[in-house]
Image (tube, helix red, strand yellow):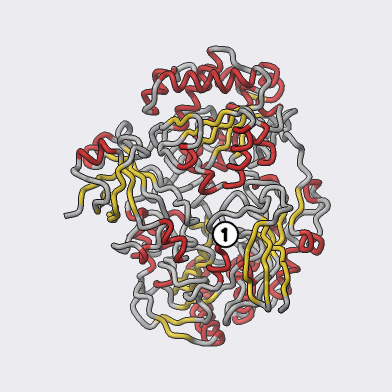
């Protein structure tokens, strides 16, 4: 028996980007473990990725190209050869590209976070075509935009420092489910005497293990941050020297937050005055005493109308109290801006040759697939190539998404590991490799390590890497630029800008051997200012926001749909609904892994006992959740984890694996956030009734 151990990296949409060790026996991956030497992974994997071999060898893996033989959505296919598949795709795309290349649309996101298998060869292909551009907004754009206006880039507290904080506020996240290795640092801090506070409408697994849980109303995080700033300023819990040296707009901010009294804040957020005052005093008082205070903000905060502003407001807090002075102080939303990636080399936008194709927002794909040609929109979408995503399950207002993909005149190609909800609508399905079967390199949005992924096993069946599929398509369509012949290793070698001091030691061959290498970053990134904003300071007042037509100061933007902001709608649909990630799934990945789905159980809706009783709903009853956009059914769990007026549907289930063939996105909206053009998944009003 030949046994080898291969260094790899987790490809999934999670801040942790774990370093993996894959055990291979006689060409078969028998075990996937966390690298014990990687400082953040420390040998520990989440329950999902620990089963990665089970997913790779799943009996339902797509191993051969398929052609649709039934109606769209039925999922009926026949096996064909790669030559047949490529010829069919080229024959469909070539005349469209000659006539109206913008009628071709790529649709992708973070099915893999890899720089090579994500947007490298694929983007080269679409740029050469002149296809429509895709605005990839579905996860993080609102928050990233608000944070960038304030701090300058997605740079924040190093995850490896959090265990030294004395106060950690976990705001809008559930790291036990979605950021496990940060949670181990928070637990270490707790053992050393730190206080942990969760701010979340739902009492998640994480909130249950914190010292305090503040259950505010969905979409009111911006108001809470304004109220905290009011108390910090009113009670002089400030670092005046840091404010003077490293911020801009304090006088205007002081005037703005004066109106956000604890009473107004509490009324807006659905909490008590005392919760506002005590949190501000704890945060500001500890900072003033020289203790490191840290905020771990996550993307739950920004999936509402005012989501970008909410992140901006929270990002102002560390500068007010001087928390950035400490390595274990400040805030982390994402570390992705720390990485000097070389996207120009990977994606080759120069292949557009001066063309400026229209941009279509992935979060409004339901509407956009149903639009006819028009001067405003441009040509109707005639072909979609989906890779690294499952839009029929994950995009908002799902009925419209399915209706768009069901168009008989829409040619759809899906690159996939499994026959997902979206693959059921494809004309051609192409089998893609998993992370164990290809080469890639990764950044992270939770830590500061460049990562390498080596192929551990040969591709199964006739599966091919995304890069190879787009190379073959380029060749079939006559694209002869040398860039389409570059190998995956050649692509990975271009991934980071070695002229940037942060990645000056990057060398692909050595990274492949070691598996990971930390960026050259300061221990405390903004201890002495140096923000990456136009002013070089933390911008309480942002001229860039004003130039973009936004309020230049922190403010509160109410949700589209809430009892307070839309009382007429709330008469019909009085319950707010959020759909955060289920612990055993990652977006729609892993839903079809039998052991994980068995652990998760079945789709369910958490309801507060008061709301359930008012509707005659008991534990285990089947309920219908509905609004004007659609409906879905699932089993009720009556629990005070959901505050009154809130229902929670942990997500995202494949629709075909739910009892009624639907999931929570039947009721979510395609309306976009205040900035960043991002979706508003948690800005949803519904009614719930017991199924008869």
Q: Position of residue 5 (x, y in %)?
A: 72, 67
The quarter holding residue 686 reads top left
Looking at the rendered structure, the secondary structure element under dot 1 is: helix
The image shows residue 425, relative to residue 332, as above or below, that is: below
Tell which of 504 and 23 is nearer to you: 23
Q: Position of residue 490 (x, y in %)?
A: 75, 68
The quarter holding residue 117 reads bottom right
Near mark 1 (Cα within 10 A), the count class, few <14, some 14-19 or many ≥20, is many
The image shows residue 257, relative to residue 525, as above or below, that is: above
Q: Position of residue 631 (x, y in %)?
A: 27, 54
Tell which of 201 and 141 is nearer to you: 201
Identify which residue is drawn at 60% across, 55% down: 45
- From where the camera sits, is residue 138 visible? yes
Identify which residue is drawn at 46% across, 63% down: 595
Tell which of 96 and 582 is nearer to you: 582
The residue most toward the front is 1
- From where the camera sits, is residue 133 visible? no
Q: Position of residue 62 (x, y in %)?
A: 50, 76
The image shows residue 617, relative to residue 244, as above or below, that is: below
Q: Viewed as shown, does residue 192 lie left or right of 375?
A: right
The image shows residue 486, relative to residue 609, as above or below, that is: below
The quarter holding residue 312 reads top right
Q: Viewed as shown, does residue 594 lie left or right of 156?
A: left
The mark total stands at 1
The residue most toward the top is 235
Picture quarter with the C terminus: bottom left
Picture quarter with the N terminus: bottom right
Identify which residue is drawn at 63% across, 33% down: 189
The residue most toward the left is 692
Q: Viewed as shown, does residue 217 lie left or right of 570?
A: right
Residue behind mark 1? 49
């Amino acid at each position: 028996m030949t046994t080898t151990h291969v260094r790899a990296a987790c490809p999934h949409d999670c801040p942790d980007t774990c370093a993996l060790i894959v055990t291979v026996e006689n060409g078969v991956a028998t075990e996937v473990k966390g690298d014990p030497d990687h400082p953040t992974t420390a040998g520990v994997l989440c329950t999902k990725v620990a089963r990665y071999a089970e997913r790779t060898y799943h009996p339902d893996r797509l191993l051969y190209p398929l052609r649709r033989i039934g109606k769209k959505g039925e999922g009926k296919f026949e096996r064909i050869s790669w030559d047949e598949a490529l010829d069919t795709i080229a024959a469909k795309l070539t005349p469209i590209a000659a006539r109206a290349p913008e009628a071709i649309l790529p649709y992708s996101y973070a099915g893999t976070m890899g720089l090579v298998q994500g947007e490298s060869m694929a983007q080269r292909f679409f740029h050469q075509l002149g296809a429509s551009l895709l605005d990839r907004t579905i996860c993080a754009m609102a928050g990233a935009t608000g944070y960038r206006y304030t701090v300058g880039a997605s740079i924040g507290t190093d995850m490896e420092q959090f265990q030294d904080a004395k106060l950690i506020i976990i705001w809008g996240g559930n790291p036990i489910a979605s950021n496990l290795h940060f949670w181990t640092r928070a637990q270490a801090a707790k053992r050393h005497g730190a206080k942990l506070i969760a701010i979340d409408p739902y009492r998640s697994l994480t909130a249950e293990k914190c010292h305090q849980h503040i259950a505010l109303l969905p979409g009111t995080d911006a108001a809470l941050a304004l109220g905290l700033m009011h108390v910090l300023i009113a009670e002089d819990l400030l670092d005046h020297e840091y404010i003077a040296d490293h911020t801009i707009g304090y006088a205007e901010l002081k005037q703005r937050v004066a109106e956000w009294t604890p009473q107004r804040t509490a009324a807006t957020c659905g909490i008590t005055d005392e919760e506002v005052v005590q949190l501000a005093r704890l945060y500001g008082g500890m900072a003033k005493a020289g203790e490191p205070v840290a905020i771990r903000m996550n993307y739950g905060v920004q999936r509402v109308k005012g989501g970008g502003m909410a992140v901006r407001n929270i990002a102002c807090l560390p500068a007010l109290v001087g928390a950035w002075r400490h390595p274990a102080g400040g805030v982390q939303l994402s570390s992705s801006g720390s990485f000097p990636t070389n996207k120009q080399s990977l994606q080759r936008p120069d292949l557009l040759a001066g063309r400026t194709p229209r941009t279509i927002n992935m979060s409004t794909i339901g509407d956009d697939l149903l639009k006819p040609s028009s001067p405003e929109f441009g040509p109707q979408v005639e072909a979609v190539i989906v890779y690294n995503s499952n839009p029929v399950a994950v995009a908002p207002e799902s009925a419209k998404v399915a209706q768009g993909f069901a168009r008989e005149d829409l040619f759809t190609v899906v690159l996939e590991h499994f026959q997902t909800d979206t693959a059921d609508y494809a004309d051609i399905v192409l089998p893609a490799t998993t992370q164990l079967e290809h080469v890639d390199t990764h950044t992270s949005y939770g830590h500061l390590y460049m990562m390498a992924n080596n192929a551990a096993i040969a591709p199964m069946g006739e599966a091919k890497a995304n890069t190879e599929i787009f190379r073959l398509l380029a060749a079939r369509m006559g694209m002869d630029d040398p860039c389409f012949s570059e190998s995956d290793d050649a692509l990975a070698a271009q991934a980071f800008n070695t002229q940037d001091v942060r990645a000056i030691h990057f060398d692909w061959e050595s990274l492949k051997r070691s598996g990971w290498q930390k960026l050259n970053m300061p221990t405390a990134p903004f201890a002495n200012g140096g923000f990456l904003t136009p002013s070089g300071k933390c911008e309480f007042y942002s001229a860039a926001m004003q130039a973009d037509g936004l309020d230049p100061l922190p403010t509160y933007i109410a949700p589209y749909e809430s009892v307070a902001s839309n009382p007429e709608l709330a008469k019909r649909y009085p319950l707010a609904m959020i759909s955060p990630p289920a612990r055993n799934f990652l977006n729609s990945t892993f839903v079809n892994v039998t052991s994980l789905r068995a652990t998760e159980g079945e789709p369910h809706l958490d309801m507060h006992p008061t709301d359930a009783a008012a509707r005659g709903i008991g534990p285990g009853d089947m309920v219908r959740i509905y609004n004007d956009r659609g409906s879905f059914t699932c089993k009720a769990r009556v629990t005070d984890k959901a505050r009154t007026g809130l229902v929670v549907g942990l997500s995202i289930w494949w629709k075909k694996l739910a009892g009624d063939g639907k999931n929570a996105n039947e009721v979510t909206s395609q309306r976009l956030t205040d900035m960043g053009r991002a979706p508003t998944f948690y800005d949803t009003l519904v009614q719930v009734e017991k199924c008869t």
